[in-house]
Image (tube, rainbow, N blue to C red):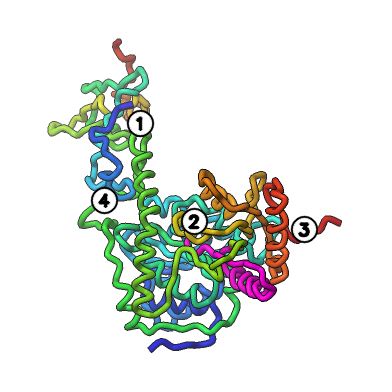
């Protein structure tokens, strides 16, 4: 039976990777991801996990080695953060284009500069368009569960794309939470060995990563795009399977107290739980406020999103990354484009907050809701507002 | 630029643009954008050492049974590496005839 233990979230993720029985771990340590790979290297060293651990000299190499090992058909894991993810940038596109089901934990941290080790989503948002499936955990249990699910999603022959499991640096990665771990035989029921469709094999030679001239480039891109959009069906199936076996239900878009809600907060990641407390506080005062948080960021679940916001008059989007010189943050952009073309649409107030680890408290969310409602009443025309910035 | 024989619809493209048939670059004939010079070998000087065949970046030389090397216009770009590397100066780059 499942064990419920108090455990640091990073260690729980390494337990999930161990339970997934990976063949290769290729990683370079970076704060705040370090504990995940540190713990995995201990597992390998102590013989608790029969995997190859490749201690590379950079993140560019970490993902390059992962590409190689995944291409021969090995179940492959890596993890990184911030500058490390930025250094992986060019290989991110190679991994998805070669259709390699690598799983990576991205422990979200602000990008330099100024240099900063604290949490926001600027690292992963700079990789938004890399063609990976991208999931966001809101707590330690989700980080554990999503890591296991990620292998099953990535390796499904209908998907064959890398998956990034995002979790907030420090706020999640370094916090001890009660986590229900699964036993090996339970995981083995859920996650069967990886059967590659195509792999590098001397007995049956193929070339992966060949030149794509203008005659074929678009067709390859179209294939990847269809696989990414189609992955949502597989994600849903995997979550249904997980729920059947272990009783924890996951959805692409989650709703909290949205019934009869007129104003909805829209969040991603661990701040969603803080935002829920703000919703509770506002509900106690009689305000019709709810929350939705997006778990499946790529592919973006448009249908589920539109369903979840049905009936709402005001949307207060809280982004933790900035699209410089644009219209706010990436979530706001997505929300606005999802609504464009709808006959009736709620008023969208876009806020950017929490950059570089600035605290986001219950009060912040209450402030955001109140502002959004006030701006909606006046139909204020604005692109976005940066919350918490000192003006003097 | 030469066209690829089979231009497949996107659903039929091998996974991620993989190449399933080893050596099929041979079918991709690129000699039509050769510069306006081509190599000519003087068989009197040729010692059959094969350096032209070794150094050719486009594998435009083929080894014949009698030991000489045949040049193939389907792949040669006219780069002149074979002429430069030939230890007997047996290869001359000559202007293409119109």
Residue B97 among magenta residues: no
Q: Which chain does the numbered disc 3 sit on?
A: A
Horizontally, residue A368 falls left or right of residue A106, namely right
User: Label 4: which residue?
Assistant: A206
Q: Is residue A68 visible?
A: no
**Sequence-wise first label, 3 or 4:** 4
Residue at which label 2 appears: A306
The image shows residue A147 at horizontal and vertical percentages of 44, 71
Mark 4 or mark 2: which comes first in sequence?
4
Cα distance between the residues tagged 2 and 1: 67 Å
Location of mark 3 (residue) = A389
Q: Looking at the image, how many numbered discs can be counted on the residues?
A: 4
Residue at the image position 59 percent from the left and 63 percent from the top: A267
10 Å neighbourhood of mark 4: few (<14), some, or many (≥20)?
some
**Do the residues bearing badges 2 and 3 touch, measured as CB atoms within 8 Å?**
no
Q: Which residues are magenta?
A: A267-296
User: Do callouts 2 and 1 point to residues on the same chain?
Assistant: no
Which of discs 2 and 1 lies nearer the camera? The answer is 2
Q: CA distance from mark 1 to mark 4?
A: 33 Å
């Amino acid at each position: 039976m499942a064990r419920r233990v108090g455990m640091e979230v990073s260690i729980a993720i390494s337990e999930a990777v161990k339970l997934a029985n990976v063949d290769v771990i290729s990683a370079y340590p970076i704060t705040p991801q370090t504990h995940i790979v540190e713990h995995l290297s201990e597992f390998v060293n102590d013989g608790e996990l029969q995997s190859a651990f490749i201690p590379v000299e950079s993140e560019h190499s970490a993902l390059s080695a992962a590409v190689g090992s995944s291409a021969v058909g090995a179940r492959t894991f890596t993890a990184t953060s911030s500058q490390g993810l930025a250094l992986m940038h060019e290989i991110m596109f190679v991994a998805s284009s070669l259709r390699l089901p690598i799983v990576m934990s991205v422990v979200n941290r602000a990008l330099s500069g100024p240099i900063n080790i604290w949490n926001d989503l600027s690292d992963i948002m700079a990789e938004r368009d890399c063609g990976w499936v991208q999931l966001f955990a809101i707590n330690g249990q989700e980080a554990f569960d999503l890591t296991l699910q990620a292998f099953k999603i990535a390796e499904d022959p209908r998907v064959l794309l890398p998956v990034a499991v995002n979790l907030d640096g420090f706020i999640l990665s370094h916090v001890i939470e009660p986590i229900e771990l699964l036993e090996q035989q339970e995981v083995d029921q859920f996650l069967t060995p990886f059967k590659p469709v195509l792999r590098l094999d001397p007995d049956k030679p193929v070339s992966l990563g060949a030149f794509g001239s203008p005659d074929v480039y678009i067709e390859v891109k179209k294939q990847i795009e269809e696989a990414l959009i189609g992955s949502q069906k597989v994600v849903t199936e995997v979550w249904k399977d997980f729920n059947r076996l272990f009783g924890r239900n996951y959805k692409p878009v989650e709703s909290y107290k949205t019934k009869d809600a007129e104003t909805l907060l829209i969040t991603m990641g661990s701040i969603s739980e803080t935002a829920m407390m703000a919703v509770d506080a506002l509900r106690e005062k009689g305000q019709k406020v709810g929350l939705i948080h997006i778990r499946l960021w790529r592919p973006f679940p448009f249908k589920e999103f539109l369903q979840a916001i049905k009936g709402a008059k005001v949307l207060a989007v809280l982004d933790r990354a900035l699209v410089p010189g644009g219209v706010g943050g990436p979530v706001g952009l997505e929300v606005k484009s999802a609504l464009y073309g709808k006959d009736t649409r709620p008023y969208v107030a876009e806020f950017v907050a929490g950059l570089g680890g600035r605290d986001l408290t219950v009060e912040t969310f209450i402030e955001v809701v109140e502002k959004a409602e006030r701006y909606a009443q006046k139909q204020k025309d604005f692109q976005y507002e940066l919350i918490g910035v000192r003006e003097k | 630029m030469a066209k690829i024989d089979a231009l497949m619809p996107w659903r039929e493209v091998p996974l991620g643009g993989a190449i399933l048939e080893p050596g099929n670059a041979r079918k991709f004939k690129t000699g039509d954008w050769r510069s306006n010079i081509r190599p000519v070998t003087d068989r009197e000087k040729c010692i059959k050492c094969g350096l032209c065949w070794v150094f050719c970046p486009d594998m435009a030389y083929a080894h014949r049974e009698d030991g000489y090397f045949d040049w193939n216009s389907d792949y040669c770009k006219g780069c002149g590496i074979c002429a430069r590397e030939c230890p007997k100066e047996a290869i001359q780059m000559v202007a293409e005839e119109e």
